[in-house]
Image (cartoon, coloured by chain):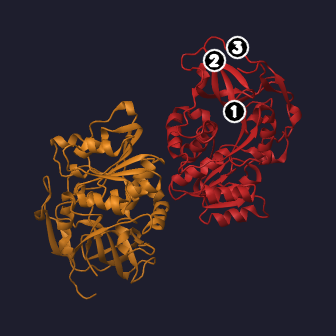
Chain colours: A red, B orange
Amino acid sequence: MSSDTNRQWVLASRPTGEPTGEDFEMVDAGVPEPGPKEVLVRTQYMSVDPYMRGRMRDADSYADPWGVGDAMRARCVGEVVESNHTDFAAGDTVTGNLYWAEYAAVDGEQLAHADTGSAPVSTALHVLGMPGRTAYVGTVDIGEVEPGDTVVVSGAAGAVGSVAGQVAAIAGARVVGIAGSDRKVEWVTDELGFDAGVNYNTDDLSAEVAEACPRGVDLYFENVGGEVSDAVLDHLAQFSRVAVSGKISLYNAQPGDEALTGPRRFHQRTKTRVEGFIVSDHAHRFEHITDRLRRWTGDQLQYRETVTDGIESAPEAFLGLFEGENIGKQLVRVGE
Amino acid sequence: MSSDTNRQWVLASRPTGEPTGEDFEMVDAGVPEPGPKEVLVRTQYMSVDPYMRGRMRDADSYADPWGVGDAMRARCVGEVVESNHTDFAAGDTVTGNLYWAEYAAVDGEQLAHADTGSAPVSTALHVLGMPGRTAYVGTVDIGEVEPGDTVVVSGAAGAVGSVAGQVAAIAGARVVGIAGSDRKVEWVTDELGFDAGVNYNTDDLSAEVAEACPRGVDLYFENVGGEVSDAVLDHLAQFSRVAVSGKISLYNAQPGDEALTGPRRFHQRTKTRVEGFIVSDHAHRFEHITDRLRRWTGDQLQYRETVTDGIESAPEAFLGLFEGENIGKQLVRVGE
């Protein structure tokens, strides 16, 4: 390798409310030597995702929190530099849960070949990775999308929402996307083929959702929570489903904040089923799901990337998620 | 009414194996007087369906058998001539389980208004009636069709199969139809938009199914049973489903016939779920399902009718089902 430097981010402090740049510290960890069965990977792309906010909090969640001073982790795609594992060789392109870092040495068992077919390797971090599988599981497995359904997706222009809406459309649904800017709404309606879009910055979101969904909402793919959620829940149809994938609007809330009450207005009379899910519980479906997503990518399934450059830009990319700055998948390009 | 004659068919004898014209007898039952809460209906269209063969057999089934000498029943659409029920008035178009007859007097509770929207009233007997709902329940509720599935439908050109394949296509599946003539195969592929079709009159049906389904069969909508079924079951994919709607090839079989063994070659290793269903158990879904079918009819959902004329033609229409003579829905036009 050309350098012994390995710039890496650690958690400097636990944020209260919205994180700031102060909560992250960049160190030079040095390029590690891979141990037995380990693989040294040079990061090409690193993913920032809303769920990382949960890791920064010292509270029970579906994964252990990061400690202050710990190296922060992220799904990455990279190139194998050196391998002590028989499944991988120098030059292979791999994906796995690595670090906010230029290099990582990890057990080969925790890596997979980035099998993105004819799509760019970065797609292993979104449409062909965890966000894409989350979208599919939420729409098909949890949401039980049915042909003719009206499906509303919040966070529609994000990495998960943009795929969820397109999968719902392939499944014969009428799809309505909610997003935070006219530019995002235009993207999902004009380029992704959503049937309608709503900018949530409006005086009467509930009325706009009603207008976009004259037959009510059969499936709500929930990415944001809060007031957007309330506006959709006003219009649930009989036997509707709410697939709770995430609630980004609440991730920076503190105990006691009013917003933590979450979705409020759904009614027993519509026999709605509300179900939260974590994609990792559906691992037995990943091969099947990724195969379908790969088949559709670039054809019925479009994507967009918002990319910042250099490992030094990782906190900025992460913080932008909560400002709604990304269209499509937010990535950090770490190396070539 | 213009006549006091009411030609009506009764079961003359229980058929052994394939029924013949001898098993039916036409009588003049006279036009009945409607009693309290009853409605007198003049039949316009009468449906013949494969399940009727079960009614002619003195054996346990999901409905009571017809007795020899009994009036035979059928789903009909007709015009109200006289009504003693507050929900119906003379001139209304209604549907219900009536008789193989020109007139019927039945309790108004057993009738429904034929709400076919802009489609002809006869569609209440197929795409917007029991066959259409059977197709939908089998594909969506039992078959759990998923976008990207390969769905095989046997009896593809029949009243149920033709709708099942189109619903699967709306749900994002690749659809392969199996039927008994090139004309039928051409109809489902050229006009209904099935992705491929197979004529089961071939030397190696299993090989033709394999060729039409390079990724295997995720959902088999079973209408016929027997050797067609075996050829499909050879190619089931992982986690596949078989929705057993009917097995017309076996309906004339007698106890002891070899064909009664039914589907034979599916394997535990594919984790296939085989599930039979009777549409009447899904009544709570009918309003929802019919609403969707009505929305699609004439647009994404095409149909065809094969019609014989006059109540006298009813046995011929029924017997033709077992010869595969109908394309689309077999009906008898009884009155204007």
Type of the residue with mark 1? Glu
CB under 8 Å between callouts 3 and 1? Answer: no
Q: Which residue in the structure is indicated by mark 2?
A: A82
Position of A298 compared to B323: left or right? right
The amino acid beneath tag 2 is Glu
Give the residue number, with chain letter if any, for mark 1: A336
Q: Is residue A278 visible in the rendered structure shown here?
A: no
Query: Which residue is denoted by mark 3 in the rendering?
Result: A33
- Circle 3 or circle 1, nearest the eye: 1
Three-letter code for the amino acid on which mark 3 is drawn? Glu
Label 2 or label 1, whichever comes before in sequence order: 2
Secondary structure state at the residue bearing disc 1: loop
Chain letter for the residue marked with disc 3 in the picture: A
The quadrant where residue B303 appears: bottom left
Task: State the CA–CA distance, disc 3 to disc 1.
Answer: 22 Å
> If the image is split into quadrants, where does the N terminus of chain A sit?
top right
| Residue B281 in sight here | yes
Point out residue A307 in the picture as x, y percentages from the top left corner. 72, 42
Where residue B181 appears, as percent x and y from the top left, is 22, 57
Q: Considering the numbered disc 2 on the image, is that residue within a helix, a strand or a loop?
A: strand
